[in-house]
């Protein structure tokens, strides 16, 4: 069976997004933030669904000259299937369609699988935000790596 393809999600996906965040994240995005992403005209939310279940999503925001990946998540049971790559390809295609110059993102410095994915997809580290995220173990803070990829001609 072929892997699901990313599709833009609408308001009806809010409950599924909230539940995926709740079961997958130590610090889940709020219902208000997810709802805003589904209704804001400068955001697009791509989702991956299989058999009526939301397996993953990505939120992309349009900025004046750039686009920014706000969030990306694949359900634990659906990882290692290439779904994050599919979501990133949809995000990159949308940013290019918007004629964005760069695609920006930030990632926890300890999230080695995500950093590997981003580098493989052409992102480079631009800097860091010191002590940006609460640590996943609740003891202290951790840096965010700032990464970007040029989109013109890429």
Image (spheres, rainbow, N blue to C red):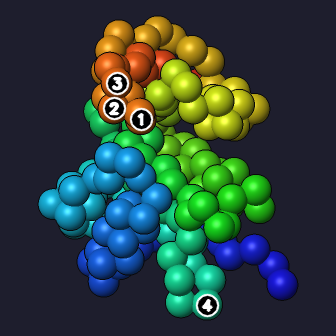
Residue 136's label in the rendered image is: 1
> Which residue is identified by label 2?
138
Along the viewing direction, whichever of 153 and 24 lies nearer the viewer: 24
- Please state, as top left, top right, bottom left or bottom right, where the C terminus lies in the image: top right
> Which residue is identified by label 4?
51
Q: Which numbered disc, 3 or 4, marks the residue closer to the eye?
A: 3
Residue drawn at x 32%, y 15% as measured from the top left: 131
**Sequence-earlier tag: 1 or 4:** 4
Q: Which numbered disc, 1 or 4, marks the residue closer to the eye?
A: 1
Distance from the alpha carbon under mark 1 to that under mark 4: 31 Å
Residue 4's label in the rendered image is: none
Q: Which numbered disc, 2 or 4, marks the residue closer to the eye?
A: 2
Tell whether 101 sits left or right of 124: left
Residue drawn at x 75%, y 74% as measured from the top left: 3
Evaluate if marks 3 and 2 touch, with contact meaning CB atoms under 8 Å apart: yes
Residue drawn at x 47%, y 28% as measured from the top left: 108
Distance from the alpha carbon under mark 1 to that under mark 2: 5 Å
**Sequence-earlier tag: 3 or 4:** 4
Q: Residue furthest right?
A: 1
Along the viewing direction, whichever of 87 and 16 lies nearer the viewer: 16
Secondary structure under badge 2? loop
Residue drawn at x 68%, y 75% as measured from the top left: 4
> Which residue is identified by label 3?
139
Evaluate if marks 2 and 4 touch, with contact meaning CB atoms under 8 Å apart: no
Distance from the alpha carbon under mark 2 to that under mark 4: 35 Å
Residue 50 locus on image (x, y percent): 62, 83
- Please state, as top left, top right, bottom left or bottom right, where the N terminus lies in the image: bottom right
Evaluate if marks 3 and 4 touch, with contact meaning CB atoms under 8 Å apart: no
Q: Quadrant of residue 82?
A: bottom right
Evaluate if marks 1 and 2 touch, with contact meaning CB atoms under 8 Å apart: yes
Q: Is residue 128 visible?
A: yes
Position of 57 relative to 93 (above/below): below
């Amino acid at each position: 069976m072929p892997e699901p393809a990313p599709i833009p999600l609408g308001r009806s996906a809010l409950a599924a997004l909230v539940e995926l965040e709740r079961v997958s994240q130590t610090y889940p995005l709020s219902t208000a933030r997810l709802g805003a992403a589904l209704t804001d005209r400068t955001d697009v939310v791509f989702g991956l669904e299989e058999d009526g279940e939301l397996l993953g999503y990505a939120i992309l925001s349009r900025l004046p000259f750039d686009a920014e990946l706000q969030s990306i998540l694949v359900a634990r049971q659906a990882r290692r299937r290439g779904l994050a790559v599919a979501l990133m390809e949809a995000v990159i295609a949308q940013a290019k369609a918007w004629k964005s110059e760069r695609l920006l993102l930030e990632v926890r410095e300890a999230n080695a699988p995500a950093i590997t994915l981003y580098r493989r997809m052409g992102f480079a580290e631009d800097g860091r935000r010191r002590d940006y995220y609460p640590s996943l173990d609740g003891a202290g803070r951790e840096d965010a790596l700032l990464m970007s990829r040029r989109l013109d001609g890429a």
